[in-house]
Image: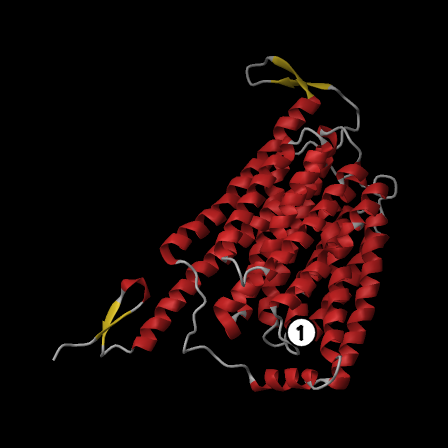
Amino acid sequence: MATKKHRFKFGFEASDDVDPVVVRHMYITCEKYVYTIILLYIQLSFGIAFSAIGPALVDLKYTLDTTMDRVSLIFVLQSAGILTGSLFGLLFKHVNRQLVLTGLLVLMSLSTLLIPFSQRLWHLYYYNYAFGVASGAWLNIKNVWTIELWNHRSAAPLQLSSLMYGLGTVLGPLIADPYLTGHNNNNTITTTIITTNGTLVVVDVEEDRLHKIRSPFVICAIIELIGPILLIIMYFLRKYEKTDDNYEEIDDQRDIDRKASVTGIRHLRPALIALVAVFLAFHMSSEQITQQFGATYFQDIPLKLTASQSAELVSAMAVADTVGLAVSVFIANIVSPHYMLSYHLFIIFVALNILFLNESAQWLLYAGSLSLAYGYSAVYPSVFALISRYIDVTDSVCTIFIISSVLLNLFMPLIIGLYIEHYVHVLMMSVSFNLAISIIVFIFTIQLINKYCKY
């Protein structure tokens, strides 16, 4: 009697003595790991490109011969683009996610490449808006796709994704650092350089700045381009399709009870969504403006750090943020999300007090800045961990959260860019105001959960 064979995806055949469910699970798991690695790499490259723009802000101002308030509008355009791009998440029921994401990531890479080649200010605005569109789509896709891949075991991959972004924000300023010129405080037009053979060469300062600032963006664009290349290769080799795995786990009973308690109370679910959206709007505004204007802030405070020193401090803050994410991976297994949020908000409060008290001590500047970055690190993933205990975070809910996360950044860069060169503390004053609102909303949310929901 002939042995019956089962044919699986990827052309593998197995006889009856091999459990087809087990084999299928093995291949689904293998595919999960491949796509997860690609998504992690894209997250890394996104962090690199996104964090390289802020340190270059002063140089972009000089290359376009404009003012800081005008060049700072690029962050408004980025936020508008993110709002637009986040809406792509609503289309993936009708179009192929993998192909659309590939095209948008190519757009992100091309936009990064063209930013320092802008001949007019509106060119710079357009390229940053395009960068924002691709970023918004990516931010919406990555969490949903990761959860879809790993289902109830998605916590670790999501934390790892945050770590990769954190690592990218460390590398971005380091890539930009050697090519930054910074403020031209002496208003010099030319400078003299002695070459290795002793020849004196007169160099145009602004022409040299223009050539130097292009290099980090070219490097970032190449790094970004690898991601969509990997996606399109996988599309033709192993096109992603959502599949059901018999090994899939079921929800924890406590999660079911918590979500049932929310569903059973009228208007509680939309109230929680609204509160989280408000919290994210104010908190993420602080994170974004700190990253966008941090390098400029460090150059304009009384200590007057150089462009290179500012980039190094921004990179050190990214390291602190990444360390915070790494620590949170372990702490999250033993500490509830609301406790993690509480102590991270407290760290931010302490850090702001250090920065306000500091006027001349560089070590205090570093202590406050690194503490601020560490405080920021686990807030965003902890918010998602907290709210996912009580409601299902669907595509539409995720879209609301992403839109709210960038909403204030539509006008905050306008305010900060207008005043930061004349009143440098406008940055930390804005962060302090956002923190106060975030703490009030967080306390109200926890009280609402304690009153109506089960832990």
Q: Looking at the image, which residue is at 72% across and 66% down?
A: 344
Q: Nearer the viewer, residue 233 or 304?
A: 233
The location of residue 24, given as percent across then percent down, is 34, 72
Mark 1 lies on residue: 386
Residue 239 is drawn in which quadrant?
bottom left
Q: Looking at the image, which residue is at 78% across and 31% down?
A: 66
Q: Residue furthest front?
A: 94
Task: Please name the amino acid that badge 1 sits on.
Answer: Leu
For residue 316, side relative to residue 18 (left or right): right
Q: Quadrant of the image for the N terminus? A: bottom left
For residue 21, side relative to residue 232 (left or right): left
The location of residue 313, given as percent across then percent down, is 69, 46
Q: Nearer the viewer, residue 240 or 210?
A: 240
Q: Looking at the image, which residue is at 74% across and 30% down?
A: 62
For residue 327, side relative to residue 239 (left or right): right
Name above or below for residue 34 compared with residue 183.
below
For residue 120, side relative to residue 94 (left or right): right
Q: Residue furthest left?
A: 1
